[in-house]
Amino acid sequence: MEKRKLGFWEIWNMSFGFLGIQFGFALQGGFMSRIFQTLGAEVDSIPGLWIAAPLTGLLVQPIIGYLSDNTWSPKYGRRKPYFLIGAILASITLFFMPHSPVLWVAAGLLWILDSSINISMEPFRALVADKLPEFQRSNGFVIQTLIIGIGTWIASNLPWLVNKLGVTNEAEAGVIPPSVVVAFSIGAFVFLISILFTIFTTKEDPPIDLEKFKSEKKESRFIPDLMASIKEMPSTMKKLGLIQFFSWFAFFTMWSLSTPALTEHVFNSPKPNVKEYAQLDKEGNVLKNTKEEVVYLDASNEQDYKAKDKVYNDAADLVGSSTGVYGLSSMAFALLLTFYTMKNKINRKYIHMASLILGGLGFIYMYYATPTTLVYSFILIGFSWGSILSMPYAMLSSSVNPKKMGMMMGLFNMFIVIPQIIAALGGINFLYKLIGEAHINAMILAGISLIIAGLCNFFITDKNAISG
């Protein structure tokens, strides 16, 4: 049965939940490394603190995809229950994240946050393929990207904005600034409300043959179905996986190391090491008084530390705001494609290739950027981000069995989390130090990786996947 063509606002409503999902991702990607540094993490240890998140995603995504493929309720639908579960868990975690008292708590909450966001995210991808006819899918994924861009820009600017509204970005050593606490609380609220908006405004379509669906559901088993899906993985999906590998290695590098790299190299305002200003115990740990306040060497050292930490926090706010620009440019990219794809087909392959290469050049330009010109790097990165969030999924949805859309979207996520795991286990630190010891070289590594991802598009040859 041919699916009904949907209007712009119907597609907008069913994708609106991505605003909240991206609030979660943007706050996580833009400010987790700042939280880790505040709680005492060394820069080279930061990627490893992210490891639990992609490891969990490797397991969560195929399971959620499988469960949503085999779910149907006349009242609750197929994908919507998973949106809601993920939104509730993510919102609670976002609220508590900036209250982390120590490093291991923050790392654990990041694990829960990333898992919860993933529970909501992939069913959203599958919903587009569920609801839209083939000729509208590029348009559907592009509208999702438009909403994601809006969320990225607003969320990335939240700590800077609430600071301008009077909430301080200063705090005692080892304490997360109030501006970050307020930003995460706002993110928690937006995440839940936007998901609820999609749930209440979007009706899911039942399986075409409900009796056959129920029969197949009784016979389905996760492990056999997973193995069968891996065997059935089309060649286009594998080629897209290679592109995704290098793309997400680049963006994981940015999320984990852009704050220390850019505050140091572009703003010349690195995070001060409190151990250089405070009294230490025999084990080399910072001494604290009964109020859990740092005991400094003297008043002069306390004043010096706080002054430098203030400069770092101001720079970190500006890095966050600059990072948000990639959401803005991805939004502009998506807006142009939205109007174009409503009436015309596009060559997804070449659009994706050009976008990734431009983003790679944006990363490399960071080495030469100033506080004023850093924005241009993120404008170029936004083109690649907008494409990453739309073109691979549009190409994938044209290549796989629609009955296994959720499972295949979940399996496709392997090509997202595996590069992040490799990066977190030392891949970033090893590779960027081949270029040089300075942390800014991690951004050059990200640029090289993204350019390789762009060139890998030459491997895509399926005409159905390319044109849409």
Image: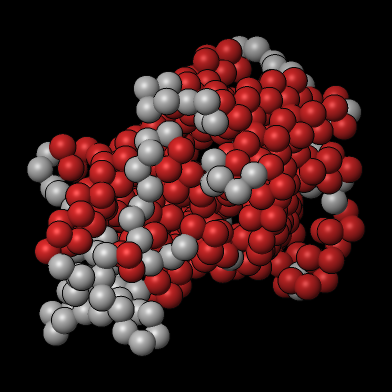
Expressed as whole percent of the image width and height from the top left, the position of residue 383 reads: 56, 25
Q: Quadrant of residue 175?
A: bottom left
> 277 left or right of 388?
left
Q: Which residue is at a point 81% across and 33% down the rendered structure image?
A: 456
Residue projecting furthest to the bottom: 282
Q: Quadrant of residue 247?
A: top right
Expressed as whole percent of the image width and height from the top left, the position of residue 442 reads: 60, 44
Asked whether 232 or 171 is in front, the reply is 171
Q: Which residue is at a point 43% across and 75% down the rendered structure image?
A: 104
Q: Which residue is at a point 12% across and 64% down the rendered structure image?
A: 299
Q: Which residue is at a point 26% across and 44% down the rendered structure image?
A: 311
Can residue 1 be seen in the rendering of this structure?
no
The number of callouts visible is 0
Q: Is residue 282 above or below residue 378?
A: below
Q: Quadrant of the C terminus?
A: top right
Q: Quadrant of the N terminus?
A: top right
Asked whether 252 or 128 is in front, the reply is 252
Q: Is residue 349 above or below residue 407?
A: above
Expressed as whole percent of the image width and height from the top left, the position of residue 461 reads: 88, 28
